[in-house]
Amino acid sequence: MGHAIVLSMVALIVLSIRNRDHIVNESGYGREHFSQATAVVLMTGLQYVFYTGSLGFPGTMSMVLGITGALSALWMINVLE
């Protein structure tokens, strides 16, 4: 079952990359929204790895801290900009 999930995620990513222009142009969201979403996901992932690997925090708490930190940084960037 796990392989089917991974395979479907890879297929969804490939389909999204192939149709990225259509998704960006027709979804109502601009490139800025997608770049911000990508930045939040990237910052969350980096913080998760740091908290679990370097500091030894549990996985759930690391995810909560990563999401909170990423959204807080995004909020500060948008407000101060």
Image (cartoon, rainbow, N blue to C red):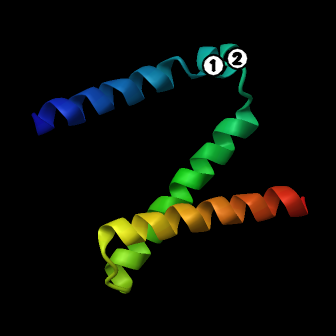
Q: From this view, report whether residue 40 is shown above or below residue 51.
A: above
Please give left or right for residue 22 compared with residue 54 in the image.
right
Q: Nearer the viewer, residue 65 or 30?
A: 65
Q: Residue at x 21, y 33 (%)?
A: 5
Note whether 63 is above or below 41 in the view shown.
Answer: below
Q: Nearer the viewer, residue 19 or 29?
A: 29
Compared across the picture, whether 14 is left or right of 30 comes to left
Give the x, y percent position of residue 63: 42, 64
Q: Which residue is mark 2?
A: 25
**SS class, disc 2:** helix
Q: What residue would you read off at disc 1? A: 21
Residue, x 90% and y 58% (percent of image)?
Answer: 81
Q: Judge the density around disc 1: few (<14), some (14-19), many (≥20) Cα neighbours within 10 Å.
A: few
Count every numbered label the image shows and give the total.
2
Examine the image and state in which quarter residue 52 appears.
bottom left
Q: Are marks 2 and 1 in contact (CB under 8 Å)?
A: yes
| Residue for point 72% across, 20% down | 28
Q: SS of the residue at dot 1?
A: helix
Crowding at label 2, few (<14), some or many (≥20) Cα neighbours within 10 Å?
few
Q: Position of residue 64 (x, y in %)?
A: 46, 65
Residue drawn at x 39%, y 71% as measured from the top left: 61
- Residue 71 position within the rendered picture, expressed as x and y whole percent measured from the top left: 64, 59
Which amino acid type is marked by label 2? Asn
Q: Seen in the image, is 66 located left or right of residue 78?
A: left
Which quarter of the rendered picture does the N terminus lie within? top left
In this rendered view, identify the residue nearer to me: 7 or 18.
7
